[in-house]
């Protein structure tokens, strides 16, 4: 009997391995931000921040914060040598124009049609979409990052999102703390499972059309 | 080049009239014209429509309050057109209570709609929002077999923007991510007021490095960075 | 008997008096360029050049030409202190967005509906519209600058343009070497005549619906 | 930051394939990638579609020849999409003889169509061209009682652009009016080759003064200004 334990770092680690040197990557607020901590040595990705910069660097040293240099979450950041600042139209031109290779977003729900919901719970919480709708519509590859189960025990992976959509049919991959999924042809395809979870556990805990692909395998070293 | 009038933040705030559509630069408060906002809050001018990336930060716990949040708190807006209100729970409270109309616009669409207004375009075709609630009430158009939403230009009466530096003609330079929506709003409103931290002589800026050409700016408010004040 | 003698400088001088300090002005290639020579002392206009600059200055001294600094006619120019360079999208954002106060263009024909033709003589000469269509559609005030008569003796002011239009209904004023005309309500209004020409001569040599306004007068000091 | 390959003008020219849609920067030759153009002329690659502000200058009297004019002369274009051909009579001759298709686009519309392609927009609504031959075959849309033409995005296979300076990551700065269409084309093509006069280390450019961010540039060709060559 495998017990589910939330593990955001596993998600971040696995996503970080998707990148190649030179890839332009936008990491959403929250869980996706963790991905930046796990980019493998030797891989140089270019982080884009939709509030107007390319070449996002690490947090500044205490006392070195600049009020004019923040990320999209209003936290102080730095810029790496070779980075650039631009206005919001240019920033979203980059995003919408397909110049961002990977966008990694947190979700409230994601479904087997590649629909994603993460900006609104009607009557309850309406933070707004910010840049998420453009990121999901425009990026070359969209990766949804989410813990696998809600507190209720229900899977975040759905047959059909019930919440208002952030974008329709744009999600390419979903990475949870139990496995790596591709969304294709109206189904989730399990490509990797993260031990101790296995395909049986995942099938049992994910009420969707789910295929375990022939080439799927355990991913052990996360 | 003609010099632009340098006015006080209080004079600037008085140029905003009740009922105006006001574009305010800044991203969660980074790059907001804080001195003019403070004076506008003092004046209490009502019934405004805000166009801004977000309704900024109003955090009851930490007491952090940035950008336009004080104007939201003061209920000076009849309507806010923004991409995000998640960091200002008061906006959401007013929305739920029916006190303030909130129009949520995807951030990239908001940027293009403002730019379109400043560029004399009627609107733009964007894929963003297709298949979501955002498409409701909008025209959909097919271009090369792809569906786009027609998003219309969004201009305003007054732009309150923030730059790092101006020359006396009104050429502007922004600093880092404090640029954001400011250069777009500078093009899209009938009256443009630029709050700046530093004012230099005409000729001191390299013409290759001007972010907003002088012709967009009507008034300058000089408000040095906090650490640079006497 | 008044004999017509072409005089481009009169046209340029009169147009230059339309401006106030701070006005943003775009001067087309050819005749309109002359306007820059006659801006009255004490009036500071801001010249825009659609190839990407504001603050157009005089021709450079011989030997001081910069291959990277030209006007829209590919001639070497200078930039004044306080000027700015920008790309073509920004340049036409300025133009189309109504941020240019006056555009002054040469014409092949201009008619009483405010239509203007200056980019194409089918089967003969097709230089292309360049920036003219945007300038005419976007500028606050459109001034057509033209000698009054063609070599054939026909007026350049028409009831209806026969050539392909550069823009429909956008011309506000026409300044020729015989007078200053406003285009309004489907008619030309003579506001000023330039001696030795007088309203009678102009009426006789302009086959259009032409009104001599009550407040019209001779403009002698050109 | 990742460094971008620095290649020769000849190598750059070989990346253009017969039949490609090629965007070439420059305004009557000011700001054109002349070294790459010269090599492309030598190669003689045919059947290209040109997207450029104009077909540059080809003046039989003075012998002046700028920018893409040599490629026109070579008949390397099947089609040219430009705003102006008046300074290159050979383009007009080829058009009249039915040898080359010429599509004339208003300059501001051309700029926006290229920008739209680079920004993922399907197109833009412009008032330019309404009531003229330019509107033929295009959709007209009414926004707030004004008529606009729908002008569609115009991307390409290869952009040949020219900048004054690049850092090794590919960040670009343009010089004066040599900027023109270059930054727009950098966003709108699958492959972007930047000819530059000067190459500097990563970190040498102020991030506030980058005109084209590095991520748009695939290859760099270093071609010093004539007076700076050995």
Image (cartoon, coloured by chain):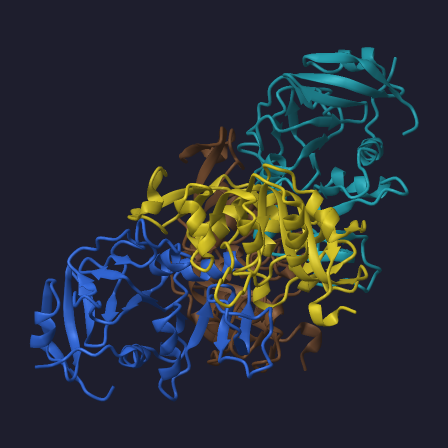
Chain colours: A cyan, B brown, C blue, D yellow
Image position, residue D62 (x, y; %): 51, 68
Q: Is residue B124 visible?
A: no
Q: Residue furthest front?
A: D61
Question: Relative to residue A159, is residue A217 drawn left or right?
Answer: right
In the image, residue B221 above or below residue D160: below
Could you tell me residue A180's position as x and y percent? 78, 24
Q: Residue A170: percent from the left, percent from the top? A: 62, 29
User: Which quadrant of the view contains residue D102?
Assistant: top left
Closer to us: C85 or B221:
C85
**In this view of the protein, which residue sits in the foreground, B138 or C91?**
C91
Residue that extends furthest to the right in the rendered view of this protein: A221
Q: Nearer the viewer, residue C15 or B115?
A: C15
Dividing the picture into quarters, in which one does residue B22 lie? Answer: bottom left
Give percent across and percent down for residue B198: 62, 76
Q: Is residue A157 toward the left or the right of residue D92 in the image?
A: right
Q: Is residue C37 visible?
A: yes
Locate residue A158: give its quadrant. Answer: top right
Image side of residue C133 versus residue C161, left or right: right
Q: Residue at x 68, y 51 (%)?
A: D39
Residue ID at (56%, 48%): D74
Residue at 47% x, 74% y: name it: B219
- Which of B229/D160 is in front? D160
The number of numbered discs placed on residues in the rendered structure image is 0
Quadrant (top left/top right/bottom left/bottom right) for the C terminus of chain D:
bottom right
Is D1 displayed left or right of C139 in the figure? right
């Amino acid at each position: 009997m495998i017990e589910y334990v939330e593990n955001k770092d596993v998600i971040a680690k696995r996503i970080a391995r998707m990148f190649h040197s030179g890839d332009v990557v936008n990491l959403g607020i929250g869980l996706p931000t963790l991905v930046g901590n796990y980019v493998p040595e030797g891989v140089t990705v270019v982080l884009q921040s939709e509030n107007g910069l390319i070449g996002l660097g690490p947090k500044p040293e205490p006392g070195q914060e600049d009020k004019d240099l923040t990320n999209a979450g209003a936290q102080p950041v730095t810029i790496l040598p070779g980075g650039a600042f631009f206005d919001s139209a240019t920033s979203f031109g980059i995003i919408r124009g397909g110049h961002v290779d990977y966008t990694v977003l947190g979700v409230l729900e994601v479904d087997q049609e590649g629909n994603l919901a993460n900006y609104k719970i009607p009557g309850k919480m309406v933070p707004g979409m910010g840049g998420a709708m453009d990121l999901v519509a425009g990026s070359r590859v969209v990766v949804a990052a989410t813990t696998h189960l809600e507190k209720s025990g229900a899977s975040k992976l759905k047959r059909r999102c019930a919440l208002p959509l952030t974008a329709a049919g744009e999600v390419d991959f979903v990475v949870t703390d139990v496995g790596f999924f591709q969304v294709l042809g109206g189904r989730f395809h399990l490509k990797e499972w993260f031990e101790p979870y296995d395909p049986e556990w995942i099938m049992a805990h994910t009420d969707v059309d789910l295929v375990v692909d022939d080439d799927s395998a355990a991913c052990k070293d996360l | 080049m003609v010099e632009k009038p340098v006015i006080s933040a209080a004079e600037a705030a008085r140029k905003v009239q009740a009922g105006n559509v006001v574009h305010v630069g800044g991203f969660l408060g980074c790059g907001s014209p804080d001195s003019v906002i403070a004076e506008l809050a003092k004046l209490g001018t009502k019934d405004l429509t805000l166009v801004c990336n977000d309704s900024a930060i109003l955090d009851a716990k930490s007491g952090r309050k940035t950008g336009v949040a004080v104007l939201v708190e003061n209920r000076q807006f009849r309507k806010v057109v923004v991409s995000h209100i998640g960091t200002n729970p008061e906006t959401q409270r007013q929305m739920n209570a029916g006190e303030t109309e909130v129009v949520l616009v995807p951030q990239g669409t908001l940027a293009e709609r403002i730019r379109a207004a400043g560029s004399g375009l009627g609107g733009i075709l964007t894929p963003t929002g297709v298949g979501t609630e955002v498409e409701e009430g909008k025209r959909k158009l097919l271009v090369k077999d792809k569906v786009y939403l027609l998003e219309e230009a969004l201009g305003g009466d007054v732009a309150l923007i923030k730059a790092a530096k101006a020359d006396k003609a009104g050429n502007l330079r922004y600093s880092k991510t404090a640029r954001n929506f400011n250069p777009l709003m500078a093009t899209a409103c009938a009256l443009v007021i630029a709050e700046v931290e530093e004012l230099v002589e005409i000729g001191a800026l390299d013409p290759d490095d001007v972010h907003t050409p002088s012709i967009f700016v009507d008034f300058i408010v000089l408000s040095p960075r906090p650490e640079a004040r006497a």
